[in-house]
Amino acid sequence: MDLSERYPSLRVSRHPLVAHKLSILRDVGTDTKKFRELVRELTWLLGYEAMADLETRPRRVETPLEAMDGGEVDPRVGLVPVLRAGLGMVDAMLELIPTAQVWHIGLYRDERTLKPVEYYNKLPDAATVQVCLILDPMLATGGSSAATVDILKAWGAARIKQVSLIAAPEGVATLSGQHPDVDIHVAAVDRELNERGYIVPGLGDAGDRQFGTFAGPSSEPGHEPGDETAEVVRRLQRDLARD
Ligand code: PRP
Ligand code: URA
């Protein structure tokens, strides 16, 4: 299924380095240190693509030889990492755009209902940036991402982009259904969600793999799902098939 035709806001990177690094990232044998390095490198590549349409304003520059008209990024950019897994994407983005503000949003996904639960938000009353880049490695059901966009739109953010490493088709459908104006930049769209709401083939739990916090079999992707969770996934899959 070519989702980019169905969802015009979806941008799947075609860069060979992205495909190469993503394969190593997915590998169950990739250790925590290497995993973090790859998240950083992939973010750099996806961030470069995600910011390709930022406007520039003229900037007069004196080179050692003469004066010339250069350019500088015009809009104020905010990076919005979704805790925890989005944290690993911040440094690479700040290397690309050191003037960006960083606004953290804390959300975790309830394991049973797969609904996002907000636990950290220190946004001031009015938006201080014009473009927001939401950073979260995984776009699974799309619930966390859609909730983050809701928060940012209520804040007054004029333009919002989602930057993720891997998306599920169900998550793309949810996010672009609720927020068709939000560009979705990803390294890959995988086959589907499993009955626990994990992306397959995916890479497992992006937070646990970055921070070395695998807590045992009960949190393992593929562990016996609850009926309620599996029903949430089936509903998302029916919505996707109807689209
Ligand atoms: C993961 C991931 C996203 C969310 C995606 O976070 O980093 O935030 O799940 O799932 P969704 O699209 O179905 O909402 P998690 O809840 O595991 O929290 P963590 O980053 O603290 O591990
Ligand atoms: N969160 C993850 O870290 N991985 C998934 O596959 C889904 C949600």
Image (cartoon, helix red, strand yellow):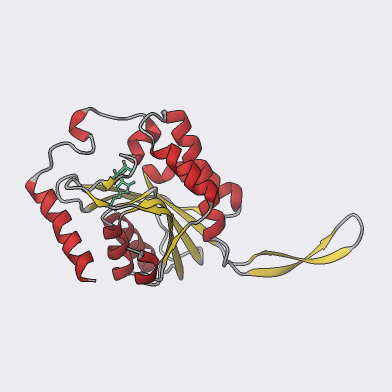
Residue most extreme to the front = 1
* Location of residue 181 in the rendering, given as x and y in whole percent from the top left corner: 40, 72
Out of 21 and 154, give the one closest to the viewer: 21
Instruction: Answer above or below: position of 202 versus 220.
Output: below
Farthest right residue in view: 65
Residue drawn at the location 30% of the way across and 44% of the way down: 201
Tag count:
0
How far across and down, in percent of the image, does residue 155 sit?
39, 65
- Considering the image in quadrants, where does the C terminus appear? bottom left
Q: 241 above or below 113? A: below
Between residue 124 and residue 62, name the one nearer to us.
62
Q: Is residue 90 visible?
A: no
Viewport quadrant of the N terminus: bottom left
Q: Is residue 13 left or right of residue 195?
A: right
130 lies left or right of 30: right
Q: Nearer the viewer, residue 94 or 171?
A: 171
Q: Which residue corresponds to the image point at 28% horizontal and 46% vertical from the top-left?
A: 200
Position of residue 212 relative to residue 161, above or below, is above
| Residue 126 seen by the camera | yes
- Residue 151: horizontal and vertical position, in percent? 34, 62
Q: Position of residue 192 (x, y in %)?
A: 26, 53
Q: Is residue 31 above or below residue 107?
A: above
Judged from this view, the residue extending furthest toward the left is 227
Residue toward you, 136 or 200: 200
